[in-house]
Image (cartoon, rainbow, N blue to C red):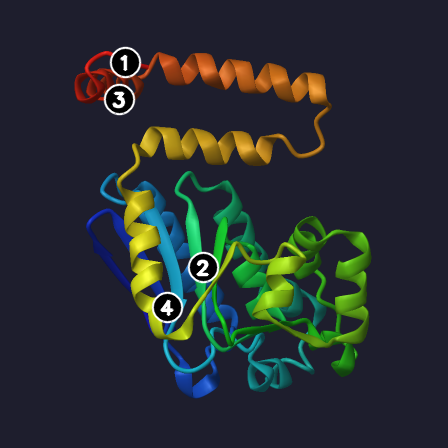
Amino acid sequence: MKRIRVEISHGIGRITLARPEKKNALDQLAAEELTQALEQHDADPSVRVVLLDADGEDFCAGADLAALEEMLAAGADAHRRDADALGRVFTTMREMSRPVVGAVRGRALAGGAGLATACDIVLAEETARFGYPEVRLGFVPAMVMTMLRRGAGERRAFELVATGRQIDAREALDIGLVSRVLPAAEFPRQVNDIVARIAQSPPGALAAIKRLYYALDGRSFRDSMALGAATNVEARATEEFRDGVRRFLARSGGLP
């Protein structure tokens, strides 16, 4: 791997963006390596949760503009391959069974903001900043809008992509782009604590939660209840659930 660093420990698969000299900017190779690492973690039975973080002061400054400049004269097919590579990162994050936690310090801009908001959980350090400045370059945050629109809602999402302005971690929390804002001095420790707690949960239950959560998109209330009931029945049939009930009753002395 040339653009990222990967390690696995205690049920946590860690993927680190490792181009701090480029503000962890994304090019086609970085996108391909991210997809490969995500798929490998999802297939590894020892991994229960994936943590996505970055080296350096910034999480990710977006697309590698130097790489894009080299492609300016390329044909549509080359640009489509480049765009599809990043799209596969986002769809892999959404479709994989393991939850993905993003730990964001510094700036997460353009595709970097999309990468953060594609995570299932986003933990932002209190000085982090998010933005979608593509419009200022005559560009469009085309794939990123899929996550942004769902996370922030139509009006706020459109304002962000139309103005290209940056927002701080607190505003990102207020509009639903991040899950929690953590103090700078405690950020690494609290991120590790949160991810370690997730890793302690049964993997089958985590996978079922993620699958059901996103399967509810666009469904009616009645259909959602039916899908939830079916998932409930499936979960009750697992050995994870049976062991969990037995352990709880043993600890509580049989009390509910």
Q: Give the residue at mark 4.
A: 187
| Amino acid on which the number 3 mark rests in the picture | Gly
**Above-or-below relation of 137 to 217:** below
The image position of residue 164, as x and y in percent, is 74, 75
Counting residues from the start of the chain, the first of labels 3 and 1 encountered is 3
- Callout 2 crowding tier (Cα within 10 Å): few <14, some 14–19, many ≥20: many
Q: Give the residue at mark 1.
A: 255
Q: Is residue 12 left or right of residue 96?
A: left
For the residues labelled 4 and 3, the Cα–Cα distance comes to: 31 Å
Q: Quadrant of residue 254?
A: top left
Q: Give the residue at mark 3.
A: 244
- Callout 3 crowding tier (Cα within 10 Å): few <14, some 14–19, many ≥20: few
For the residues labelled 2 and 3, the Cα–Cα distance comes to: 28 Å
Kindly state the secondary structure of the residue where label 1 is placed.
loop
Circle 2 or circle 3, nearest the eye: 3
| Amino acid on which the number 1 mark rests in the picture | Leu
For the residues labelled 4 and 1, the Cα–Cα distance comes to: 38 Å
Counting residues from the start of the chain, the first of labels 4 and 1 encountered is 4
Image point 32% across, 67% down: which residue?
188
The image position of residue 229, as x and y in percent, is 54, 14
Image point 46% across, 16% down: which residue?
232
Q: Give the residue at mark 2.
A: 102
